[in-house]
Image: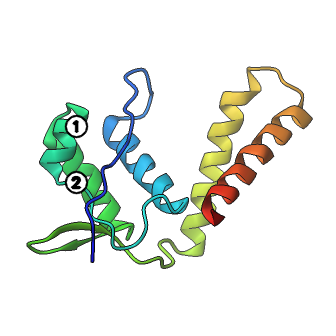
Amino acid sequence: MARQQPLMIEIATGDVRSISKQIIDGVRMKVATGELTPGWQLPSVRGLAQQLTINPNTVAKAYAELVAEGWLESRPGLGLFVAAPRQRLNSKERERRLDDAIQRFVNDVVSLDYPTDTVLERLSDELRALDTRKSA
């Protein structure tokens, strides 16, 4: 039986990403780390908009993209639920997104002037922490 999950997402006003993108990234991360499991019901568009004090159209836009990408599934008359895991993107699109993410990361980090070994060690620590959260 599906339960409605409070969606604890923080919206940062100084973030360069749009609010819609922050919601999308937040839901993706929670699903990828297993914090939101398949079958969990998400708050309604209006409910999440009230929680985050944002326009419902912004939430609707984010939810629509998450449904289109296969992270969420709509059950008519019941609401939105976390979809069962499946390959959401083809290998070419996954490679493109990985390349984009790495390029953004490098552009952000290069100006901080840390040695490469330090950056790689910190990145590796973060990825291992995510793996731990996934397996917990």
Spot occupied by residue 39 in the image (x, y as percentages of width and height): 33, 73
Question: In the current view of this chain or complex, which residue is farthest to the left?
Answer: 77
Circles 2, 1 touching at the beta carbon (< 8 Å): yes
Question: What residue lies at 34% left-to-right and 60% top-to-bottom?
Answer: 66
Residue annotated with mark 1: 51
For numbered disc 1, what is the local secondary structure? helix
**Residue 121 — which label?**
none
Display colour scheme: rainbow
Nearest the camera: 33 or 136? 136
Report the quarter where the N terminus lies: bottom left
Q: Is residue 39 left or right of residue 46?
A: right
Spot occupied by residue 115 in the image (x, y as percentages of width and height): 89, 28
Spot occupied by residue 122 in the image (x, y as percentages of width and height): 79, 38
Q: Is residue 75 above or below residue 106?
A: below
For numbered disc 2, what is the local secondary structure? loop
| Circle 2 crowding by C-alpha within 10 Å: few under 14, some 14–19, many from 20 | some
| Circle 1 crowding by C-alpha within 10 Å: few under 14, some 14–19, many from 20 | some
Spot occupied by residue 108 in the image (x, y as percentages of width and height): 66, 29
Question: What residue lies at 84% left-to-right and 24% top-to-bottom?
Answer: 114
Q: Is residue 94 left or right of residue 16?
A: right
Question: What residue lies at 71% left-to-right and 44% top-to-bottom?
Answer: 126
Q: Is residue 61 above or below residue 73?
A: above
Kind of residue at badge 1: Gln
Report the quarter where the C terminus lies: bottom right
**Residue 43 — which label?**
2
Q: Is residue 82 left or right of residue 97?
A: left
Nearest the camera: 117 or 44? 44
Q: Quadrant of residue 83?
A: bottom left
| Mark closer to the chain start, 2 or 1 | 2
Q: Quadrant of residue 80?
A: bottom left
Q: Is residue 48 above or below residue 37?
A: above
